[in-house]
Image (cartoon, grey):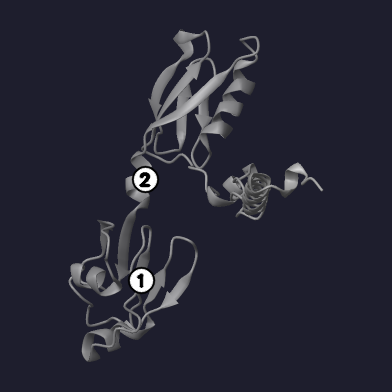
Amino acid sequence: MSLSPTGTPAARTWLSTRWVSLIGALILLGGCAGGTAPPPSVDDADEDAIFDDEYRIGVGDSLRIDVWRNPDLSVEVPVRPDGRVSVPLAGDLRVGNRTPEEVSTMLQERLATYIRDPFVTVIVTDMGSAAYRSRVRVTGAVAEPLSLPYRQGMTVLDLVLEAGGLTEFARPNAAVLYRANGDRLDLRLGRMLSRGDMATNYSLSPGDVITVPERGF
């Protein structure tokens, strides 16, 4: 009886090699299918949640206003103490506490009386108001009420000492820290200064205000 080609040693070696190659390919495909999927991309909604706060124009800012194809109407203007700017044709415009996009829309509406389909861009070139909003203040029964530029690491005690400490008429344990975000924190300055109790020696943030009331007579 003659042997079939698959019965020869060479044939068996060839079949074994093919099986090893096939198993290796299946393992590779399985590893690719079971790998960790790439992280989901950040969609527009996620970006809006992260970058939630839009910059709002304040007194002391400088605005660059460009009116497309109308260079005579394009100006760079400071925001006055009344929160307004003056723009050719548009006149006085209240921009304080508005976003650049809101101001662009307002200008386009005003200029539409004189220009067909005006396109206006507004860019804040100098954020002068940012320095004002980043200050910290202490008022009331302190030796010298102060308004200081915020410094990283400042605490309640630092600011009170900068103000020369409390007056003899102060009610130290009735002092209050008002946060720029609207939070209100009670302070115990008497315990802080006389006992070294730092429980209410909070770290300050830009825009914080400390008030120290006086005693009633």
Picture coordinates of residue 125, whole percent (x, y): 37, 30
- Mark 1: which secondary structure? strand
Q: Viewer-proximal residue, 37 or 115?
A: 37
Q: Looking at the image, is 11 positioned above or below residue 215?
A: above
Give the quadrant of the C terminus.
Answer: bottom left
Q: Residue at x 36, y 45 (%)?
A: 130
Q: Residue at x 53, y 39 (%)?
A: 98
Few, some or many C-alpha atoms within 10 Å of disc 2 (few <14, some 14-19, many ≥20)?
Answer: some
**Which badge, 2 or 1, is on the more N-terminal residue?**
2
The answer to which image quadrant residue 185 occupies is: bottom left
Q: Amino acid at mark 1?
A: Thr
Outermost residue toward the bottom in this view:
195
Few, some or many C-alpha atoms within 10 Å of disc 1 (few <14, some 14-19, many ≥20)?
Answer: many
Q: CA separation, marks 2 and 1?
A: 22 Å
Picture coordinates of residue 107, whole percent (x, y): 57, 23
Label at residue 203: none
State left or right for residue 43 relative to residue 208: right
Q: Could you tell me if the residues under marks 2 and 1 are in contact, i.e. CB atoms within 8 Å?
A: no
Picture coordinates of residue 214, whole percent (x, y): 33, 79
State left or right for residue 123 relative to residue 60: right
Q: Amino acid at mark 2?
A: Ala
Q: Residue at x 30, y 66 (%)?
A: 138
Q: Viewer-proximal residue, 81 or 201?
A: 201
Circle 2 sits on which residue?
A: 130
The answer to which image quadrant residue 201 occupies is: bottom left
Q: Is residue 16 visible?
A: yes
Q: Viewer-proximal residue, 69 or 15?
A: 15
Q: Viewer-proximal residue, 189 or 204?
A: 204
Circle 1 sits on which residue?
A: 211
- Mark 2: which secondary structure? helix
